Amino acid sequence: QVQPVESGGGSVQAGGSMRLSCTVPRIILSTFTMYDWSWYRQAPEKERELVADLSSGDYADAVKGRFTISKDNARKRVYLQMNDLKAEDTAVYYCSAYTSSRGRYWGHGTQVTVSS
């Protein structure tokens, strides 16, 4: 079983930047690379939504041009670089690992709060 762990959340002022990180403790490289990694977010009283998917290169319209998803195989980490943050980016951000054969695994989430 894969249990993603997110880090890097916190509070920032509008216009600022933040980088989220996701890893799976003790995961081996071959397992890490077999998964499709993505970031989702859930704002209060809203449904969870896809923010960025690494394999497809898809981004939510609201974050295109501001957010970038990337992966470092050597460190076995997935990142979400967020620039020009807006108040509406405030949400709990979740890292997700997916394969068609094993399904989707979620992290516990990290809170991002953007003050205007």
Image (spheres, rainbow, N blue to C red):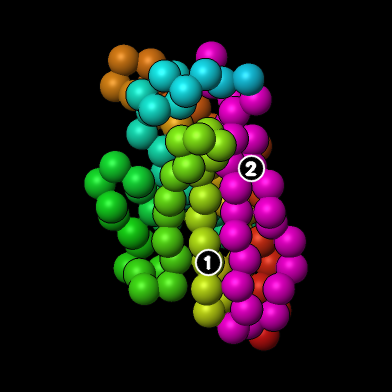
Q: Tell me the residue that label 2 is attached to.
A: 6
Q: Is residue 24 magenta?
A: yes
The residue type indicated by label 2 comes to: Glu
Q: Tell me the residue that label 1 is attached to.
A: 82
**Side of 91 where 102 appears, left or right:** left
Task: Kindly identify the residue that appears in the image at 44 percent across and 66 percent down.
Answer: 67
Q: Is residue 18 magenta?
A: yes
The residue type indicated by label 1 comes to: Met
Residue 43 location (% of width, % of height) = 57, 59
Q: How many marks?
A: 2
Can see residue 37?
A: yes
Q: Which residue occupies the extreme left position in the image?
A: 56
First in residue order: circle 2 vs circle 1: 2
**Side of 21 where 70 appears, left or right:** left
Quarter of the picture holding the C terminus: bottom right
Can see residue 96?
A: no
Q: Residues within 10 Å of mark 1 (few under 14, many from 20)?
A: many
* Vertical relation: 51 (above or below) 73: below
* Cβ–Cβ under 8 Å for marks 2 and 1: no
Residue 61 location (% of width, % of height) = 33, 68
The range drawn in magenta is: 1-25
Task: Kindly identify the residue that appears in the image at 35 percent across and 46 percent down.
Answer: 54
Distance from the alpha carbon under mark 2 to that under mark 1: 14 Å
Residue 115 location (% of width, % of height) = 70, 79
Task: Kindly identify the residue that appears in the image at 43 percent across and 51 percent down.
Answer: 70
Looking at the rendering, which quadrant does residue 2 occupy?
Answer: top right
